[in-house]
Image: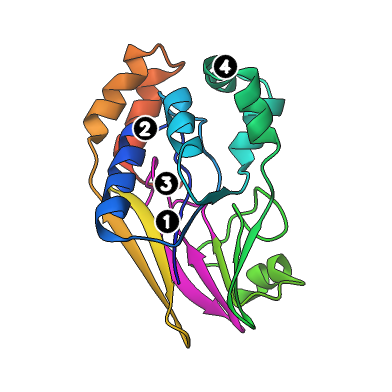
Amino acid sequence: MRIVIFSDIHGNAVALEAVLAHIRHETAPDLIIVAGDLVADGPRPAESLAILRALPNTRFVIGNTDYDVVHERDIEYDFTRAQLSAEDLQWLDDLPFAQTVAAAPGRELLVVHANPCDLRAAIKPDHSPAIIRPLLDGVSQEIVAFGHYHVPFVRTVDRYTLVDVASVGFPRDGLLRAVYVTLTFDGANWQIAHHRIAFDAEAVARDYAAVGYPNAERKARKLLEARYRHP
């Protein structure tokens, strides 16, 4: 069984198309799971959502910005919401919190957006096990995959393998490439691989101004920096 997981498209249709082209030509998955944050923060939310909803054999989970686009009000969410239909917004609001896959008895995968408890607390590559353990309370699956933090990593905490699938539309680890993950179960073990895909980030950056996105210059700069700013 081969599963593709990606997350955090953030309305970046250019990066999404690049990832999907690579998946179609190189990966041949049995299942795709998309781990949330589909439309907010990007210049092309409607286009991105239309592409995603048309994918065959694909499951989704809700991300924090998917919830916020429907329920919160600020200038950027207002822009995103205005591009979407009422049916689109209801579809986002109805997305489940988690998806599970059983590759074999006792060999299970859990996919969530940020962590198994909520939509917002990030699991970071340098977090101590003491920080992470409460977020895994009650989890029975051996692999937990998620996005939200936009930095790809694999690490082990106790009996769990944690996989940050990172971001398609807003990479934040200093490499301006979209990321997706393959998890392949060979009947005995899981093989996990991150794939980094080039996309025309400069074109996406220019598109913010072209579509009238609020705070376009700041958002374009944030995309091109491709990393978190720390004080």
Amino acid bearing label 4? Ile
The residue nearer to you, when weighing 47 against 134, is 47
Instruction: Tell me the mark number nearer the camera, choosing from 2 and 1.
Output: 2
* Label 1: how many Cα within 10 Å (few below 14, some 14–19, many 20+): many
According to the picture, the residue beneath numbered tag 2 turns out to be 13
Circle on res. 75: 4
Circle on res. 162: none
Label 4 vs 3, first from the N-terminus: 4
* Label 4: how many Cα within 10 Å (few below 14, some 14–19, many 20+): few
Colour mode of the rendering: rainbow
Alpha carbon distance from label 3 to label 2: 22 Å
Is disc 3 placed on a helix, strand or loop?
A: loop
Q: Residue at image x 47%, y 85%? A: 187
Going by the image, does 13 lie left or right of 149? left
Query: Residue 67 at x, y = what percent?
Result: 67, 35
The residue nearer to you, when weighing 134 against 230, is 134
| Res 182 → quadrant | bottom left
Label 3 vs 2, first from the N-terminus: 2
According to the picture, the residue beneath numbered tag 3 turns out to be 228
Circle on res. 151: 1
Question: What is the residue that sits farthest to the right in this orientation?
Answer: 138
The residue nearer to you, when weighing 209 against 39, is 39
- Prevailing secondary structure class for the magenta stretch in the rendered image: loop
Label 1 vs 4, first from the N-terminus: 4
Whether label 2 touches label 1, CB < 8 Å: no
| Res 106 → quadrant | bottom right
Query: Residue 188 at x, y = what percent?
Result: 48, 88
* Label 2: how many Cα within 10 Å (few below 14, some 14–19, many 20+): many
- In the rendered image of this protein, does residue 167 appear above or below residue 53? below
Asked whether 148 falls inside the magenta stretch, the response is yes
Label 2 vs 4, first from the N-terminus: 2
Stretch in magenta: 146-174
